[in-house]
Image (cartoon, rainbow, N blue to C red):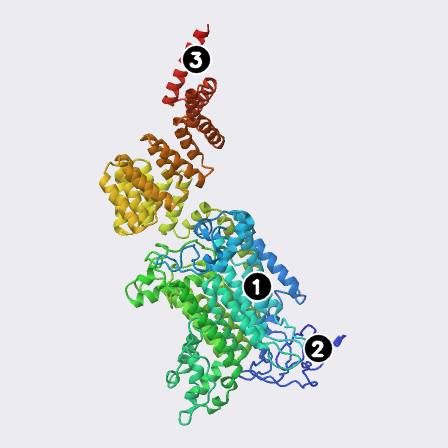
Amino acid sequence: MGVGGEPGRVGSCGRRGAGGRGAAGGSRGAVRGRPLPLSGPGGRLEPPEFPHPGGRCGRGSGSLQIPNQHNAGAGGHQPAVFRMAVLDTDLDHIFPSSVLPPLWAKLVVGLVAIVCFARSYDGDFVFDDSEAIVNNKDLQAETPLGDLWHHDFWGSRLSSNTSHKSYRPLTVLTFRINYYLSGGFHPVGFHVVNILLHGGISVLMVDVFSVLFGGLQYTSKGRRLHLAPRASLLAALLFAVHPVHTECVAGVVGRADLLCALFFLLSFLGYCKAFRESNKEGTYSSTFWVLLSIFLGAVSMLCKEQGITVLSCKLIEVAILHTTAPPGKGLLSSMCGFQSHLGHLHSSQLEGETMWECVPKFYNQTSKMGLNAVFDILVIGKFNVLEIVQKVLHKDKSLESLGMLRNGGLLFRMTLLTSGGAGMLYVRWRIMGTGPPAFTEVDNPASFADGMLVRAVNYNYYYSLNAWLLLCPWWLCFDWSMGCIPLIKSVSDWRVIALAALWFCLIGLICQALCSEDGHKRRILTLGLGFLVIPFLPASNLFFRVGFVVAERVLYLPSVGYCVLLTFGFGALSKHTKKKKLIAAVVLGILLINMLRCVVRSGQWRSEEQLFRSALSVCPLNAKVHYNIGKNLADKGNQTAAIRYYREAVRLNPKYVHAMNNLGNILKERNELQEAEELLSLAVRIQPDFAAAWMNLGIVQNSLKRFEAAEQSYRMAIKHRRKYPDCYYNLGRLYADLNRHVDALNAWRNATMLKPEHSLAWNNMIILLDNTGNLAQAEAVGREALELIPNDHSLMFSLANVLGKSQKYKESEALFLKAIKANPNAASYHGNLAVLYHRWGHLDLAKKHYEISLQLDPMASGTKENYGLLRRKLELMQKKDV
């Protein structure tokens, strides 16, 4: 095959390419004989032989070794022969030989990804969107941009003990830009950005999968060759249409996962570019791309914490050491530097063990590295675990001469990755200010279980559920906590079978990935498992407790590895079966079913009502599902139905204090005060620092005329939440009922200081001062309030009443008319304006507004009485005139 042309297809090792075409120097013609080598600097190089790592490639085996990968430590120019990946030929029946060119393939993948989730473009803000976007002051222009770097994802101070510790300033910045461009909280713009991001990531996946399946091969002009166009296209389509991505795409807060994945993949591709051959010098221009990869990894982590896994899954204590065995220490000691980097896999752990005991331990250690490091060591460095373990077990001294262990370039890159990852984690920890967030048992019950064995069994069951969501994404739920997944407490629980099945499959894949004699198979399986496992590690509870049981959003990046393994599986099936049309039909069926599921699921994410109700069939035992349905119904005014769902939430979780609080509120409004007090009292006993429940308990006790208990409840609420303007407002109402006017005014003043736009507190101050005859003070408070809230018609109405009593008729009239313009159907506004005109002597205008007021509210007794007085006065005046 000529350099610069399309690569030819090769049937088996050592045979001529079947029908490959190429062009060199502008000529076109069939290539015959053995493939042409890549010409390097200083003349033409003869093609070397490419041994099959881990074993010899025999004729008729059906396997094909991908050409030699670039060794980053090589100082000279290495020749290479370009061949189409074997997996691609096995998928020929799914995508014919006239496969789409890379540009068209990317357009198709991007279009399919957008179509799958386009239905969510006009959805509402749902579930967590309310807290992260609508109620997040960091999105608004009055909040300084610098605050984004000190606040968590939800807008709270990161150093606060109550912070969730989710540090994603770049994601919040994109929300802020969305808010600015949309002119407010209009969800369409937010949803469109998410959909386009998923489309762009799916397009990028074509290049990522091309590297994973086809390896890194470049022409003399530095152009990377796509040696697996069919496999990369199929895997990218599987990724684009996976229904488990719906939460990330249709839920606006899922943008954190999308941005994290985008820069994660860019970091990986940037790292791959570190091994591009240089035409002029024959060396590798790696440093710039490694540094750029680290920078992109940092950006990914600032979008979501999961992004750190592209560089490091945990702090790597020691980089790979470029050493040889000290005298008298033997072969095993010469491995200690490399083993140290792989999680301190000491020689004592290998000696005396069988190969099948060593390999899982080795893979467990390598899985703690970042994805770029795994790619570098196992793919670029061609680290053959099978060969190394065999030589270690047989004490083969030839291991001392392994080039990779003396590779200064690899050491340098690992040092950069380690330093970059450790530095980012350190800065992240310093910014966080305190320890990790405090989660409750309902968030992650397995982490609070008694006994390490119970916790381990349930963690592994959670892993199997995540694997099942990737395999069969039909049962999807917005939340998997609060009883949705009961704990496994006995080995007799049938769900233990899921754990066994998971680890049976994983161990089988790991052994194939590390011990197969087919280097091509080893590379694909290792990278597939790497993408599957490494990005999932932060959500695994292995390093720290997480605040969820199962979360579909964390599977966005791991699904890349799933798509690699599934595509490889289809290729393997095609190779060993004659029913290729059946496999093609299965692949097409999976793509179509997943597309349909994406469309349906996207529709469920368009509104909270649909989203919450869709969860009932998946998690009927989830108290949070019933709670959210009840809250949605209560917001719509359907209190009867809301009570039913709140009661069910409390039944499923007797310690669900938020459900008790909301249910108590509704019962309070329906004047069922005794039961409301019982529920709220139970809530504060279960959670003594629940400030909202203390305040609501105080309101109920106030209604029951238990004033001392009510005051004590209000004080407890303020104790646990010092900045609580609503509680100060209700405390002021209590003091007003007790005729403690000074205390009431002080409480309302505290409320307005904490929340200057607290209209009710301002109004009550004006009314109380008015009723007690302090008109001048009432006027001053009213004018102060209107300066802060100039468009509040209720404040205009209250101040107009005060001005009318002070005989400032003209100014009072102007405020009454302005209030009526803002709220023309308020009967009291017309009635009080009529009283003003009545006093002012404008009797005709008074009569007009009395009549309008009575039309709006015929039962207003005060207005009726005043209107009767006016009519009698008008009749007397008419008689005098006669």
Closer to the N terminus: mark 3 or mark 1?
1
Closer to the N terminus: mark 1 or mark 2?
2
Label 1 sits on residue: 236
Label 3 sits on residue: 874
Do residues under tags 1 and 2 come within 8 Å of each other at their CB atoms? Answer: no
- Which of these two is toward me, 811 or 847? 811
Name the amino acid, label 1: Ala
Vertical relation: 480 (above or below) 288: above
What secondary structure is marked by label 3? helix
| Side (left or right) of 581 relative to 503 | right
Name the amino acid, label 2: Gly
Q: Give the x, y percent position of residue 572.
A: 55, 71
Q: Give the x, y percent position of residue 402.
A: 50, 87
Q: Residue furthest top?
A: 882
Residue drawn at (48%, 72%), measured in percent from left and top?
A: 420
Vertical relation: 482 (above or below) 489: above
